[in-house]
Image (cartoon, rainbow, N blue to C red):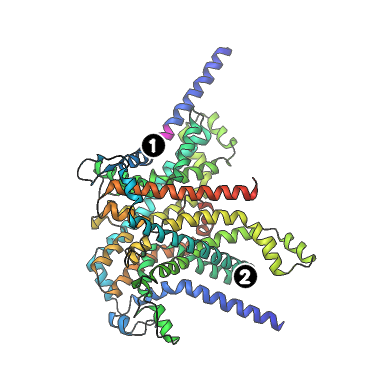
Amino acid sequence: MHKKVLTKTLYHGFMILISLTMVYPFIWSGISSFKKIEQLYNGNPLSLIPNPFTIENYQRLFEVLPFGRFTLNSMYLSVCIPIAMIAVASLSAYALTRLEFPGRNLIFFAFIATMMIPSHVVLIPNYRTIVDMHLYNTFFALFLTSMFTSSNAFNIFFFRQFFLTIPKDLESAGIIDGCSYFTIFFRIILPNSQPAIATTAILSFRTVWNQFLWPMIVINDYNKMTLTVGLKYLKEWEQNWAVLLSGASLSIIPIVIVFLIFQKQFMSTTLSSGFGGK
Amino acid sequence: MRLKSFQQKSGIKKQEAKVGWLFISPALIGFSIFTYGSIIRSCFYSLTEWDLLTKPAFIGLKNYITVFSDPYFYQYMGNTLFFVVTLVPIVMVVSLLLALLINVHSKLKGVGNIYRTALFLPSITSTVAISMVWLWIFNPDMGLINNFLFSMGFTEVPQWLASTTWSKPALVIMRVWQMSGYYMIMFLAGLQTIPLSLYEASEVDGATKAQQFWSITIPMLSNMFFIVAILLIIEAFNMFESVFIMTSGGPLGSTSTIMYYIYEKAFRYYEMGYASALAWVFFIVILCITLIQYKFRHEQTGE
């Protein structure tokens, strides 16, 4: 009995230590963003109490760059881009699963094959395409590449796998009633695909929120920038580390909140993410 | 009558095919422009000299020849491989250990969940934001790590990102911290598919915990090891954001990866042709390694 208590204490002690290691940088940067720069430079860096407590780092942050705007842009894009991606992916997957037409398997294979192509191969041509289409510095640049490159090919694959599990009988009723295919898709298939929609939405949300290289290349107008890209410019423009930490904290907090709300879904999507999720 | 129904049927078929093409067309058109077309154009650009402003000038295989005689290519490929051979085994071992630790007390609903959430947290946040925080953690004079070392009594501390010896290990530490939770979840799922009866049966036969681990847990996870290895190798090869924010490839190119080199060549020096050639060489390297893995796996399982 005594031994059992000991191993339990050891176990929890160790787990708490590891958990703290994982969480500490977040807590520390969050708290340090309320410290004065003097404390950050001269005080004990391990201290977790801002003394004096100040919000001037955040005031400065919003002065240097339009971080409010960045936050709104990030929120808008990480909600709307996944919706657009899902619209394209689910419609294509429906056609690839339920509608018969010549060349169907070939097309499916062609989509799947793109999952092998790393994004850096298409980076330069896509940049050129965006410039030629006069979409440089627009949100369209971000929408289009998300919708039509390998990460959405993964979504097509994922939706197809899911649609295969929906019984055909569900649609037969609709077909007999003379509904159009689009009505069937919209009224019968989509409402029955909530788990697949949730998974792809969460995966895509995370990808879009954290996306860096592509938005950095195609957007250089501060009004259209996302938080992640904004941080890069903040690092170039600002020397005060307390302000940099407040910027980093600001971009971390929203996704952490979303994560804490949808924890279960986040963790279960890890498994389905497979090859295309990252 | 039969003819009519046949006509009707083929009419429905035709209608179905039409709708099928209609539904697939947005994706097909989009992918043709942003993926298939881009792959072909990237191939073409790699055979040209092109600075974005003028028209691409065809120069044949010259870019590829330059890649293989470019000392930076070899240095940065070396760096990239360093990250791959350190990150892949370390993250694998760490994430497996974490999964085992969590799994030991899988009955602990409340506390167990808190541990799991804490361990998973670093993997959902953006590498860019996290890199900013770690930049400060690694600060030689004021950072957390060195102050911790000072308080432990060390007087000689690593200069981390400012030193050519410690810059790579620093990035590895940060990435292990960030990535492990994600793969932990994968291993955890793998562990939970192992039937308990296997352990019970071996216990009856008098197997020790260590024997159980090596002859039940590890072999039963082989599928998961394979998936994790493939994902991890690709992720390690593509290391870019942490390098971009934390070191810009420095000091003295000691942390520059091929991805960072491609970015630099393309969007800092506007050598688009050369960058495209680099991208293709890099793609072939990753592809070969992935295929070798599949082959290795194939021989192992005999499937």
Left-right relation of A20 to B297: left
Q: Nearer the viewer, residue A200 or A9?
A: A9
Three-letter code for the amino acid on which mark 2 is drawn:
Leu
Residue behind mark 2: B108
Q: A190 or A196, which lies in front?
A: A196
Residue placed farthest to the front in the image?
B69
Q: Which residues are magenta?
A: B22-30
Mark 2 Cα-neighbour bin, 10 Å: few <14, some 14–19, many ≥20: few
**Residue nearest the observer in this picture, A110 or A72:** A110
Q: Is residue B178 left or right of residue A248?
A: right
The image quarter in which residue B243 lies: bottom left
Residue at figure coordinates x 47%, y 68% from the top left: B177
Residue B288 coordinates in the image, percent (x, y): 48, 48
Q: Residues within 10 Å of mark 1 (few under 14, many from 20)?
A: some
Residue A187: say if magenta: no
Type of amino acid at the residue the image marks with label 1: Pro
Report whether mark 1 lies on the same chain as mark 2: yes
Q: Chain of mark 2?
A: B
User: Which residue shows up at 50% across the image and 49% down it?
Assistant: B290
**Dot 1 corresponds to which residue?**
B26
